[in-house]
């Protein structure tokens, strides 16, 4: 029985390069998110790219270099409340939309990013402080 094709195999490495690059271009222009990052965004961009490549079925270079992703622990030092969560999600989904992936890939990635954003929130906020995830689909 053949193994299913991964998102990484289907979309190719450059898709993830473009996704991480486009996201960090948006971060650089976003007042809410920019404050959470160091002056030089390149290291964060490379880590995001590596993580996404690995998560979506590409080489496990991220874990080989950094160990288990442990995303919640790694993001613990950063104040991520509803405003930051929503800004991250909005910028990630806008970047994804700009790359125009096939509908099934977009749906899978949107679901993952929505769950990740909620999971990484580590500061309280009212239940209604976050708007519905920004998405046209």
Image: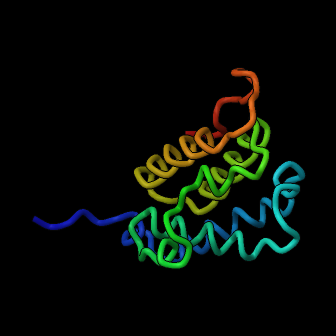
Q: Position of residue 92 (x, y in %)?
A: 66, 53
**As displayed, is residue 21 above or below residue 119?**
below
| Quadrant including the C terminus | top right
| Quadrant including the N terminus | bottom left
Q: How is the image coloured?
A: rainbow
Q: Tell me which residue sits at (75%, 36%) in the image.
A: 123
| Left or right relative to 118: residue 130 | right
Q: Position of residue 130 (x, y in %)?
A: 72, 30
Question: Quarter-wise, where is residue 115 in the image?
Answer: top right
Q: Tell me which residue sits at (54%, 66%) in the image.
A: 51
**As displayed, is residue 34 above or below residue 117?**
below
- Name the residue nearer the viewer: 38 or 6: 38
Q: Tell me which residue sits at (53%, 62%) in the image.
A: 69
Question: Quarter-wise, where is residue 86 in the image?
Answer: top right
Question: Quarter-wise, where is residue 10 in the image?
Answer: bottom left
| Left or right relative to 115: residue 25 | right
| Left or right relative to 9: residue 21 | right
- Name the residue nearer the viewer: 3 or 54: 54
In the rendered image, the residue lying farthest to the left is 1
What is the number of callouts on the image? 0
Q: Tell me which residue sits at (75%, 52%) in the image.
A: 77
- Name the residue nearer the viewer: 123 or 34: 123
């Amino acid at each position: 029985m053949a193994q299913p094709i991964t998102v990484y195999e289907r979309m190719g490495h450059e898709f993830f390069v473009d996704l991480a690059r486009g996201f960090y271009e948006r971060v650089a222009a976003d007042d809410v998110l920019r404050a959470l990052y160091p002056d030089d965004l390149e290291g964060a961009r490379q880590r995001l790219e590596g993580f996404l490549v690995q998560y979506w079925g590409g080489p496990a270079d991220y874990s080989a270099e950094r160990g288990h992703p442990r995303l919640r622990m790694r993001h613990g030092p950063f104040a991520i409340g509803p405003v930051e969560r929503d800004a991250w999600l909005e910028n990630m989904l806008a970047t994804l939309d700009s790359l125009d992936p096939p509908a099934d890939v977009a749906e899978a990635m949107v679901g993952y990013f929505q769950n990740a954003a909620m999971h990484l929130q580590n500061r309280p906020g009212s239940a209604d402080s976050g708007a519905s995830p920004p998405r046209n689909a």
